[in-house]
Image (cartoon, rainbow, N blue to C red):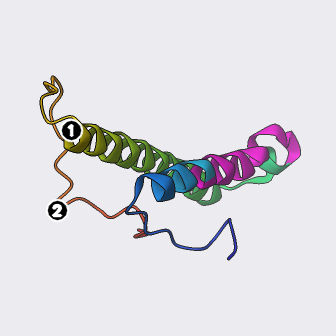
Amino acid sequence: MNIITTDLEPKTFGEFIDALIIANLRMWHAQEVVYEIETLNAMTHPQMFDFLKQATWLNLLRNRAMDGLDSTLAAEIMERNPATERIDKPIAMEGQLPLWEQV
């Protein structure tokens, strides 16, 4: 498994924790470019656009991992304690871009 490039398909609470950690590592790795001023100055506008698009994509993956983590945790709590009143709305994941699908 390559932690930077391997596609993720989280389904369980633990897998979503892994996905969130990996997404954070990927964002950290990609953002190292921001601290290299010479590299940033040498980028053309299309290269900068691609960099920003990738950073946005990584943030989306991170947000989806957090949403999946929240959703699986809430489902587990509700399953173990059916009398618990749920005050948030479940996140509808149908029709959304899967966490592991790249644009």
Q: Residue at x 40, y 70 (%)?
A: 101
Q: Badge 1: few (under 14), some or many (20 or more) residues near its Cα, within 10 Å?
A: some
55 left or right, relative to 72: right
Nearer the observer, disc 1 or disc 2? 1
Residue of label 2: 95
Please report contact status of discs 1 and 2: CB closer than 8 Å, yes or no: no
Residue 54 image offset from top left, x and y in percent: 55, 56
> In this rendering, is residue 57 above or below 35?
below
Q: Is residue 34 magenta?
A: yes
Residue 2 image offset from top left, x and y in percent: 70, 73
Q: Residue at x 56, y 58 (%)?
A: 50
Residue of label 1: 78
Looking at the rendered structure, the kind of residue marked 1 is: Met
Residue 63 image offset from top left, x and y in percent: 42, 43
Looking at the rendered structure, the kind of residue marked 2 is: Gly
**Between marks 1 and 2, how big is the CA–CA gap?**
24 Å
Q: Residue at x 52, y 72 (%)?
A: 7
Q: Is residue 83 magenta?
A: no
Q: Which quadrant of the figure has residue 80?
A: top left
85 left or right, relative to 3: left
Circle 2 SS class = loop
Circle 1 SS class = helix
Question: Which stretch did the figure color magenta?
Answer: 22-38
As drawn, the label of residue 43 is none
Pick whichever of labels 1 and 2 is earlier in the sequence: 1
In the picture, the quarter occupied by the N terminus is bottom right
Q: Residue at x 39, y 61 (%)?
A: 99
Camera-nearest residue between 64 and 81: 81
